[in-house]
Amino acid sequence: MLGRMSEAPSSPRPVPPVEEVTAGCWSLPVPIRHSPLGYTLVYAFETAGQVALVDAGLDTPEGLAALEDGLATVGARLADVRGVIVTHVHPDHYGLAGRVREASDAWIALHPDDAALIPSRYGSVDALLDGVEGWLRDAGAPPAEVAELRDASLSFRQFVSVAQPDVDLRDGARVDVPGWNLRAVHTPGHTPGHCCLHEPDAGLVLTGDHVLPRITPNVSRHPQSGPDPLGAFLASLERLRGFSDALVLPAHEWRFTGLDARLDEIAAHHAERLDEVAATVAAGAATVWEVAQRLSWSRGWDALSGFMRRAALGEAHAHLVVLERRGRLRRAGEQPLRWAAA
């Protein structure tokens, strides 16, 4: 399931060239089909005659070709990949990991909370679809919208070569990449098991989708999100404090510095969004659907359809949960869920 990015560009970004970020660490862009994000930045770390990847990209012919071409620039092949560290389970990060392992016998590392989602996301999905349908009804979606939005992410499954991970990417764990000091930092919110990576010796922090230079990741309440994904996300932002001198390597857009300032911007964005949601409820919106319809979206609510509309609905729900937990809203009804000012 691709996570919708708030304020995403309206047209695909041009794919940048392969670049050496620092000695032995390379940025390999892998295109994302039909996405305004344009590409996923896969990072390759040279290690003992092999390479280790952070993320793998979307499993499409053009994605696989771009990954192979990028590795060739580094002087490597798929067969030379030692391991794939997957920041989270979305297709544009996890999709090609299985194909890489088929070609190289590489290990795959993923946080257990995201590994647990693989069977229901990419295997037998009936139970997940039932859960999504129930969530949409609880959110107050009209019946016609429930029928359309329930299956909105099914098409993404074709872009994943399913593979169970071999390595638990737990918080604080040092990843087995000789010559590098890569350590996992668990940063849930965008997904329950999302992880960043810190390399203190090289002065790098790889942020996946958790922190991007211009846009913010979709943080949605849905059947696989956990009870308070936005609360988890905001707490996870604080876990990256102290890495402010590092060069930030995100999975989309571009590299940047000044991590603490960007963390402040993201926290401020969500504070403003929480105020907007609270004001929308005070003005009479009660259900998740009613709130989402009235919020400001970069393209406007009416321009959102399919998975993008479902992601917006989940984002509104996540903000309502935080406001309730903070005592600014109270639960005012069930089936559908309703909120009122506290």
Image (cartoon, rainbow, N blue to C red):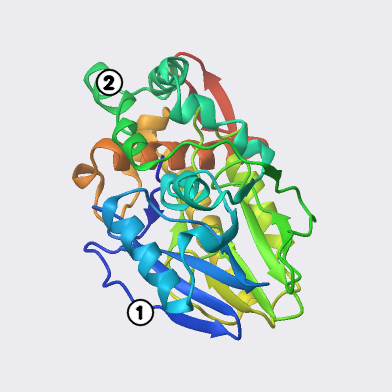
Where residue 135 sits: x, y (%)? 45, 22
Rate crowding at label 2 as few (under 14), some (14 to 19) or many (20 or more) other CA atoms within 10 Å: few
Rate crowding at label 1 as few (under 14), some (14 to 19) or many (20 or more) other CA atoms within 10 Å: few
With 191 as the anchor, is 48 left or right in this view? right
Q: Nearer the viewer, residue 332 or 110?
A: 110
Earlier in the chain: of badge 2 and badge 1, it is: 1
SS at mark 1?
loop
Where residue 93 sits: x, y (%)? 47, 52
Residue 149, image quadrant: top left
Residue at position x 30%, y 49% in the image? 60
SS at mark 2?
loop
Whole-Å distance between the Cαs marked 2 and 1? 45 Å
User: What's the residue type where badge 2 is placed?
Assistant: Pro
Where residue 196 sits: x, y (%)? 64, 59
Q: Nearer the viewer, residue 300 or 240?
A: 240
Give the labeled residue for mark 1. 17
165 versus 233 height, above or below: above
Give the labeled residue for mark 2. 142
116 versus 98 height, above or below: above
Residue at position x 35%, y 46% in the image? 295
Q: Nearer the viewer, residue 9 or 198?
A: 198
Whether residue 108 can be seen here: yes
Where residue 184 sits: x, y (%)? 72, 58
With 253 as the anchor, is 118 left or right in this view? right
With 61 as the anchor, is 326 left or right in this view? right
